[in-house]
């Protein structure tokens, strides 16, 4: 009895702490919004950063933080936070537009390697909704498939069994697709393979050492893909396929 009481009290205390944290975060967001509207962008950015540190992460907070940094002409930080917002809300037109505007202000204009049509189609499909949205969709299709299967097995009508059979196959296909996209999205988020350059001018080297040959130079604000890692160094690839090594502290993962 005593043990159950203690567990209950700990659970209630945890819920109370979470409620207080989210209430404080909402208050901080309101203060940040007020500061932004008043033109105090540095103060607004500081408050939005506090919200993120408190664990209340959302596309809206990252978007507003990106806008604050953009107003302060800190383009790398603006792009970083717009990219983070876009990962949580891939179809948001405001985020897409502001990210495009911010990217127009960076030095490097790199043409992307052409993608095969099915890869481009698949990436577009992944970006229709957020990873959480795809996970919810998979769950809905998964349970729908089992429900249709149960109805198929219980039905005695041939017509109904045919209807349930074709419906079940269709739902199964959508279940597999939504699971695959949700899994890939969460895997991409876990490995976090994209980053933004923060160094004003960054030589990309042929090897992970200071004595490595400078292959080419990139500049702050550019998005790169991380393809390998060694202590203190990251191997990156840019949009045109060129790759090389940079110091870890010169980029920040999205």
Image: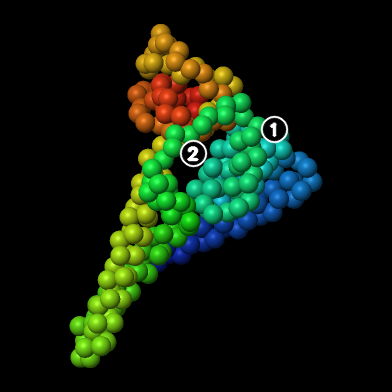
Structural crowding at the residue carrying mark 1, measured as other residues with C-alpha within 10 Å and reported as few (<14), some (14–19) or many (≥20): few
Residue 54 appears anywhere in the view:
no
The residue labelled by disc 1 is: 73
- State the residue at coordinates (76%, 48%): 37
Q: Residue 204, percent across and down? A: 46, 19
- State the residue at coordinates (32%, 70%): 171
Q: Residue 17, percent across and down? A: 51, 57
In this orientation, which residue lies closer to the viewer: 20 or 63?
Answer: 63
Location of residue 6 (image quadrant): bottom left
What is the number of callouts on the image?
A: 2
Q: Are marks 1 and 2 in contact (CB under 8 Å)?
A: no
Structural crowding at the residue carrying mark 2, measured as other residues with C-alpha within 10 Å and reported as few (<14), some (14–19) or many (≥20): some
Among numbered discs 1 and 2, the one appearing first in the sequence:
1
Depicted 151 relative to depicted 170: above or below: below
Residue 239 shown left or right of residue 157 in the figure: right
Question: Marks 1 and 2, Cα distance to the nearest angstrom?
Answer: 19 Å
Residue at the far bottom in the pictured view: 157
**Residue 254, which numbered label?**
2
- State the residue at coordinates (58%, 54%): 92
Location of residue 144 (image quadrant): bottom left
Residue 181 appears anywhere in the view:
yes
* Snapshot colouring: rainbow
- State the residue at coordinates (52%, 52%): 90
Q: Residue 189, percent across and down? A: 41, 45
Depicted 214 relative to depicted 3: above or below: above
Q: Residue 108, percent across and down? A: 57, 26
Residue 210 shown left or right of residue 171 in the figure: right
């Amino acid at each position: 009895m005593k043990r159950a009481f203690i567990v209950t009290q700990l659970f209630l205390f945890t819920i109370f702490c979470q409620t207080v944290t989210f209430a404080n975060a909402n208050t901080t967001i309101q203060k940040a919004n007020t500061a932004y509207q008043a033109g105090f962008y540095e103060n607004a950015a500081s408050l939005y950063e506090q919200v993120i540190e408190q664990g209340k992460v959302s596309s809206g907070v990252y978007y507003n933080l990106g806008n604050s940094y953009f107003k302060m002409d800190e383009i790398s930080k603006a792009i970083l936070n717009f990219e983070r917002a876009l990962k949580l809300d891939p179809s948001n037109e405001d985020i897409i537009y502001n990210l495009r505007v911010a990217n127009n202000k960076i030095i490097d204009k790199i043409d992307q390697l052409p993608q095969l049509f099915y890869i481009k189609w698949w990436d577009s499909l992944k970006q229709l909704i957020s990873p959480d949205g795809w996970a919810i969709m998979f769950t809905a299709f998964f349970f729908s498939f089992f429900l249709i299967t149960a109805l198929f097995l219980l039905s005695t009508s041939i017509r109904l069994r045919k209807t349930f059979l074709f419906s079940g196959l269709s739902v199964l296909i959508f279940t597999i697709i939504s699971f695959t996209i949700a899994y890939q999205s969460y895997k991409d988020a876990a490995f976090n393979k994209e980053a933004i350059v923060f160094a004003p001018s960054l030589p990309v080297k042929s090897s992970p050492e200071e004595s490595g040959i400078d292959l080419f130079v990139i500049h702050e604000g550019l998005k790169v893909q991380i393809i390998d890692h060694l202590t203190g160094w990251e191997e990156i690839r840019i949009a045109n396929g060129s790759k090389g090594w940079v110091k870890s502290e010169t980029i920040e993962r999205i």
